[in-house]
Image (tube, rainbow, N blue to C red):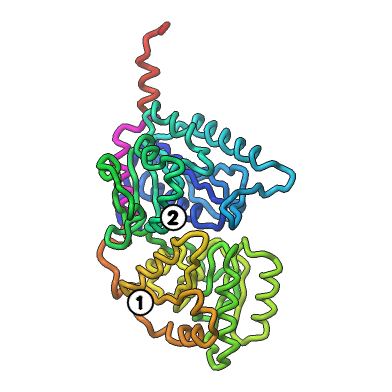
Amino acid sequence: MNKLEIKRLDHTRILMYSHDTFGLGHLRRCRAIAHSIVETFKGVSVLIISGSQIAGAFDFKARVDFVKIPSVIKLYNGEYDSVGEYIDIEEILEMRKLIIQKTAEAFNPDIFIVDKEPLGLKGELEPTLEMFKNTGTQSVLGLRDVMDSPELLKKEWAKQDMLNKIDGYYNSIWVYGPEHFWNPLTGFDIPTSISKKLSHVGFLERENNSVSGNEGHSLPAKYILVTAGGGGDGIAIMEQVLAAREYDPQLDFPIVMVLGPFMKTENRDRLRLRASRLANVTVIDFESRMELLMQNAIALVGMCGYNTFCEVLSFDKKALFVPRTKPRQEQYIRANRASEIGLCTVLQPEEAAIPSVMAEALSKLPTQQSPSDNLKKGDMSGLDNICLEVENMSVLPKAVSTKVKKLLKPQGA
């Protein structure tokens, strides 16, 4: 990461959108991209619009800031609800739409980068995207390496005529993964106009920029890290690991479990009680700098969300993934494709639920292949390639050209 020569792009403004209804993935991905851009270019300012309830828990570099829009939560039936029980969801959605549009008008960005949701939550980005068509702002859609199964994604996007909307609103489409790994638009009949806009930039490499080690945590020198991202649906994998330790008491290599900020209190309490009865199990509620914990881990057990997967590859950690299969197939597809090419091992959810099977997988984890044994050159170049794309888009920053137009405007016009 940041292998490019530091350059100057004076007065360039980049606006990013992260809808954030469940987990931490979208905000953490946007933050990684924003930090890479400001590290590479002097004179660039990045503003992230985020719906994350805990956006303020993360550190942001100079020239990166965020605007918090009201949070909503995604229910397991696919519908949305407000976090505050006294505010109607329709009111929240209208507030979000207006804040986004007013922020976009005031910030007047040269580049607008949208994470994953082409039209935003419930179409909240459409007025802003329509506005940018007439301002010269370059709109970019950033897609994960895997979005969902082709069947489910086609069904979801068909309701909104999504391909035509993407074609009309976006100048570029970045896929955050190498082309040989997966195409997030697999199964679609992609028009040439969209194909020309699409580029696979590679996975987003992470690094640990913190000055100290496991700050604030009393941890063993080496351990297996167990994480489920935000933790909202992480109870199963945590219990499966504990069940394996209970099944095989000789399996006593140190384990550090990070529960995540969105795990329910009753689940959190149950895990802590169960872990307290076992040797060499440390439980942490939340760590905003997962890179700190990842660096000293010898291996990882997780669900194969995008950020965790990129961290595993970046820090070259041996990994065992138990992907969720609902409400999306994203983790399932990513984990199994990664296993095919030797980047990790995978247990299906029904296998991981058997203590003897999980215990055997944990015992083999420290001796399995590392991701670097099978990664290809350029696979981890996503952030560098994004910076090159930004540089190409910023030959004449719109913020400067707007001022020039005002100076050249005839008096009385």
Numbered disc 1: secondary structure: loop
Mark 1: amino acid: Ser
Nearest the viewer among 206 and 52 is 52
**Residue 349 placement, left or right of 389:** right
Provide residue 18's location: percent of width, then percent of height: 50, 47
Nearest the viewer among 196 and 413 is 196
Reading the image, the residue beneath label 2 is 152
In the image as oriented, which residue stretches furthest toward the right? 86
Reading the image, the residue beneath label 1 is 370
- Residue 177: quarter of image: bottom left
Quarter occupied by the N terminus: bottom left
Q: Earlier in the sequence, mark 2 or mark 1?
A: 2
- Residue 337: quarter of image: bottom left
Neighbor class of circle 1 (other Cα within 10 Å; few <14, some 14-19, many 20+) is many
Provide residue 37's location: percent of width, then percent of height: 39, 48
Numbered disc 2: secondary structure: helix
Name the residue rendered at 47%, 69% in the picture. 323
Provide residue 47's location: percent of width, then percent of height: 49, 42
Q: In the rendered structure, does residue 128 fall within the stretch colored magenta? A: no
Residue 355 higher or lower than 234, as above or below? below
Quarter occupied by the C terminus: top left
Q: CA distance from mark 2 to mark 1?
A: 32 Å
Mark 2: amino acid: Leu
Name the residue rendered at 62%, 47% in the picture. 71
Nearest the viewer among 65 and 265 is 265
**Residue 227 placement, left or right of 129:** right
Q: In the rendered structure, does residue 389 fall within the stretch colored magenta? A: yes
Q: Which residues are magenta?
A: 382-399
Neighbor class of circle 2 (other Cα within 10 Å; few <14, some 14-19, many 20+) is some
In the image as oriented, which residue stretches furthest toward the bottom? 250
Provide residue 224's location: percent of width, then percent of height: 50, 79
Q: Main secondary structure of the magenta part?
A: helix
